[in-house]
Amino acid sequence: MKRVVWFLYALGKAGLPEVVQCVAGELKLDKTVKHDFYAATGFYLDAAGERYVIKINRRVSVLGLRLVGRFLATREVRAYQKLSDLEGIPAFVDWCTDTGFIHQYIDGHPLEKGRAVPDGFFDQLLELVDQLNRRGIAYVDTNKPQNIIQGIDGRPYLIDFQIHFDSSRWWPGVLGRRLLRIFHRADVYHVLKNKRRFRPDELTDAQRQIVEKRGLAVRFHRTLTKPYFWVRRPVMRWLRSTGRVMPEQSK
């Protein structure tokens, strides 16, 4: 039974390493933020007390899942590196094992009910999504408020590029550009849904019409991501109900 339980964790029974050596020096584990089937994420501190984030994708090797962990880490690192000069994207720091990496910690908190959102926050977020689009990337995950961080500077930051779409990498040509437009529209739609939820007073009439009309982009996005969430949601519900996963925070 214990083997079955530990198989559900990305890193098995071991969990995140207590100490990691990287280009930033020696980092010590401060807190495990999340450890589920797909990955483990934790906060680490260097000797000066500066905080970093380490995310290690699945390493437990069953049915080739470790290879999936390597693939996910590689594509996510590639996205952070490609967007490294954009304000609103955490800076990539270093690799950590063959399925994990280290990135800058964003001091702030995820969007959540009951917290005030400053004026212009969602307009800045829309501009960030547009900047990604101009680089050939769609975030694909703006429907999750916990992936949108409100920094202490009041600006938006995007974390977790696990399911992003990079048209230049995998889909060059007409098809890639078409898919990018579809995913970009879905990103905009979900940003505006969050804007309606957190700052409805700033929603323009044109934006309200976009939110109220579910177009092809949104339907396509839901069709593509539905199998992923069919698997993820029941696993996450079970892990949270048994206390095996902590609430998600800034990472």
Image (cartoon, grey):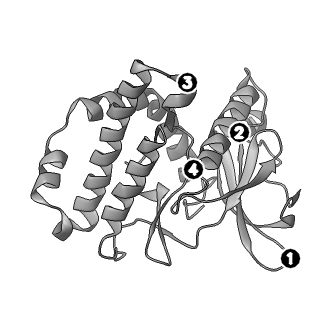
Secondary structure of residue under mark 2:
helix
Q: Amino acid at mark 3?
A: Trp
Q: Amino acid at mark 1?
A: Ala
Secondary structure of residue under mark 4:
loop
Which residue is found at the position 34% from the left and 77% from the top? 116
Q: Which residue is mark 1?
A: 47
Q: Indicate the quadrant containing the C terminus: top left, top right, bottom left or bottom right.
A: bottom right
Task: Give the label, 2 or 1, closer to the camera.
Answer: 1
Task: Give the label, 2 or 3, closer to the camera.
Answer: 3
> In the picture, residue 141 is in which quadrant?
top left
Q: Which residue is mark 4?
A: 83
Q: In whole angstroms, how far apart are the C-alphas of marks 3 and 1?
A: 40 Å
> In the picture, residue 31 is in which quadrant?
bottom right
Relative to 168, is 79 above or below? below
Label disc, if present, on residue 170 of the rendered structure: 3
Q: In whole angstroms, how far apart are the C-alphas of marks 4 and 3?
A: 17 Å
Instruction: State the image coordinates of residue 190 (x, y, percent, origin top left).
Output: 31, 48
Q: Left or right: 47 with respect to 73? A: right
Q: In whole angstroms, how far apart are the C-alphas of marks 4 and 2?
A: 37 Å
Relative to 88, is 108 above or below? below
